[in-house]
């Protein structure tokens, strides 16, 4: 007995062919694909490539920091006057920072001491995590050690002050507001600061002993400070302990 619905005609072979999976749809094809966005890792492959590119950029940046001090400016007589980028083993550019308490601290006046120059920003999460360690170290720091906190110029003054006050910072700390740059102050420019936090440990003879990119703890500080002392004791005396800060 008929149900009232016509029986569909048998499918043509061409229709059956269209229903079959295409070459691009087969599992084997996805397994073999090497292009980004395909295969088993299609959702993560683009992120993986991005991560590789970031690592390459970081590697180039570290290379530039470690070799930048070799590229020197020359005066009219062809002699070397200063270097563009402070790097390990090179003289640290001099600077003066006006602290939040209204006092000026000058790097060259700290000669004979280990100086830890920490570049920070209120937006920086690793900076927030390491600030208590810096303050804790400062509270019992040896007499031959000075900590200087240099806040980013892109931070508004009130936010920078609130950040330092919130952590109860008592070591010299202020905002790098000099220079003509909008995002980078004169100190950060001289020290080629492109990441936060970034910390230079300067030996008593004014030479950069270590450059640390990233978060530090109290044990790190003790270790790097001792290294700076050792570096100074092993280094020959230099006629000029600090470079004059370059004008911008």
Image (cartoon, helix red, strand yellow):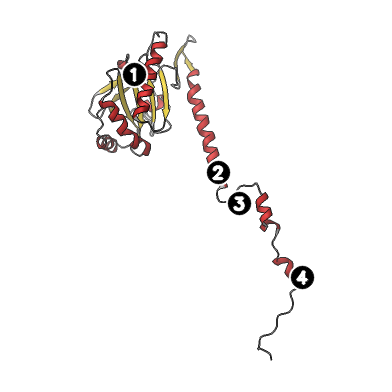
Name the N-terminal-most of marks 1 and 3.
3
Q: Which residue is mark 4?
A: 13
- Mark with earlier residue (1, 2): 2
What residue does disc 3 label?
A: 40
The answer to whether mark 1 and mark 4 are in CB contact below 8 A is no
What is the spatial separation of the Cα atoms under label 3 and label 4, in whole angstroms? 32 Å
Q: Eyeballing the image, is 34 above or below 1?
A: above
Quadrant holding the N terminus: bottom right
In-image side of 52 versus 7 (left or right): left
Task: Report, in whole angstroms, how far the alpha carbon at label 2 lies from the one at label 3.
Answer: 13 Å
Q: Mark 3, residues whose alpha carbon is within 10 Å: few (<14), some, or many (≥20)?
A: few
Label 3 close to label 4 by CB (< 8 Å): no
- In this rendering, does residue 209 appear at all? yes
Residue at disc 4, secondary structure: helix
* First reached walking from the N terminus: tag 1 or tag 4: 4
Question: Which residue corresponds to mark 2?
Answer: 48
Residue 58, image x and y in percent?
50, 33
Q: Where, quadrant-wise, is the C terminus in this rendering?
A: top left
């Amino acid at each position: 007995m008929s149900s009232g619905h016509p029986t569909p005609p048998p499918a043509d072979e061409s229709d059956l062919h269209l229903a079959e999976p295409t070459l691009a749809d087969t599992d084997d094809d996805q397994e073999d694909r090497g292009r980004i966005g395909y295969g088993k890792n299609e959702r993560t492959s683009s992120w993986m490539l991005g991560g590789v590119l970031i690592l390459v950029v970081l590697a180039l940046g570290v290379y530039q920091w470690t070799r930048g001090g070799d590229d020197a400016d020359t005066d009219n007589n062809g002699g070397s006057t200063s270097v563009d980028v402070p790097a390990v083993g090179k003289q640290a550019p001099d600077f003066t920072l006006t602290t939040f308490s209204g006092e000026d601290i000058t790097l060259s006046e700290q000669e004979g001491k280990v100086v830890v120059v920490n570049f920070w920003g209120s937006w920086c999460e690793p900076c927030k995590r390491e600030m208590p360690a810096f303050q804790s170290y400062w509270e019992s720091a040896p007499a031959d050690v000075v900590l200087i906190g240099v806040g980013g110029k892109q931070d508004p003054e009130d936010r920078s002050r609130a950040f330092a006050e919130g952590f109860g910072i008592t070591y010299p700390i202020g905002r790098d507001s000099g220079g003509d740059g909008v995002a980078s102050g004169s100190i950060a420019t001289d020290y080629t600061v492109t990441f936060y936090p970034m910390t230079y440990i300067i030996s008593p003879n004014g030479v950069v002993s270590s450059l640390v990119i990233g978060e530090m703890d109290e044990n790190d500080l003790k270790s790097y400070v001792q290294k700076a002392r050792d570096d100074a004791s092993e280094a020959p005396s230099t006629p000029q302990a600090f470079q004059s800060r370059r004008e911008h």
